[in-house]
Image: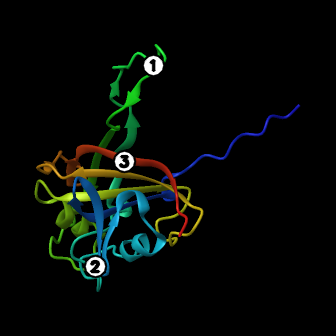
Amino acid sequence: MVVPIPDKLINETDTVLLIPAHEVLGIPNAITPTGLVAYDALTTAVLNRYAPITSTGHANAGAGGNVSCAIVSDGFTLSFTDSQEDDEKTLCEPANSVDLTDFGFDNDMTGFRDANPAAADSVFALWKALTFAPDVPYIIVHRVGYASTVPFAVGQEIDVYYSHTDLPVNVHADGQKQKIQQVFISKSTAKPNYVLAA
C-alpha cells in the first residue's frame, strides 16, 4: 500500500498585510477610504485595497500594505498561543467549565532593509516605513495557501491579529544582509480561521 505524502506549504504561499487600525469603544477597526470596518467583519474589498501596496511609491501607499516579500522566512512568527482563561463559576455552571478571556499570540517579524532607504519601488522600504516607530496600531492579516500576489476572494481563510508596533531593532551581522526586527505588541484581540464571506 502506498501512503500519499501531503503537499507541503512553501514560503511563496504566505501573505501578510499590515492594515492601519483605529479603536472605537475598544474594538479595532480597519481604516479604509470609505470608513471603518471592524476586525471581525473584514471583506475582500478591504483586503484588496491593501494587498497591491508593495512599495512606498504605490498610488495608495501611506498607512498600510503587503509586506510579505520583505519578511525573512526564518525570522517570522505569527501564531496563536494558549489563551487566557477565567475559571470562576456560578453554582449553576459545570465544575470543569472555563471562559476564554484574551487570545494569546506571538507576532515577531524580521524584514530586510533596502540599500536605498528612499527607494520608492521597494517592499523593503515599505517594511521600514510601516514599522519605524512604536505604538502604531495595525490589524495584521495572515493568509496561507496563496501567493501574495493573488487577490483575496470569498471563501479564503485568514487569521486576523490586532497589534501595535514596538521599537524596531536593527539587525546587523558581519557578512549578512541588514534587517529590521519588529516584535509587535499583542493586544489580545484576534479572529482565527476567519472565512471571507464578502
Secondary structure under tag 1 reads loop
Q: Nearer the viewer, residue 94 or 39?
A: 94
Residue of label 3: 190
Q: Amino acid at mark 3?
A: Ala
Which amino acid type corresponds to the residue marked 2 in the rendered image?
Answer: Asp
Q: Position of residue 54 (x, y in %)?
A: 33, 73
Q: Residue furthest top?
A: 95
Mark number, residue 121? 2
Give the amino acid at mark 1.
Cys
Q: Is residue 7 toward the left or the right of residue 111 in the image?
A: right
Read off the residue under disc 1: 92
In the image, what residue occupies the spot 56% across and 61% down?
156
> In the drawing, does residue 194 fall left or right of residue 86?
right
Q: Which residue is more in the foreground, 172 or 1?
A: 1
For the rendered model, the colour scheme is rainbow
Q: Nearer the viewer, mark 2 or mark 1?
A: 1
Q: Earlier in the sequence, mark 2 or mark 1?
A: 1
Where does the image place residue 164, in percent across and percent down from the top left?
Answer: 20, 52
Outermost residue, right direction? 1
Q: Which of the 4 quarters of the picture holds residue 126?
A: bottom left
Q: Which mark is residue 103?
A: none
Q: Which quadrant of the view contains residue 39?
A: bottom left
Q: Earlier in the sequence, mark 1 or mark 3?
A: 1
Relative to 175, is 61 above or below? below
> Considering only order in the chain, which callout, 3 or 2, is on the residue closer to the N terminus?
2
Percent of width and height locating residue 97: 46, 21
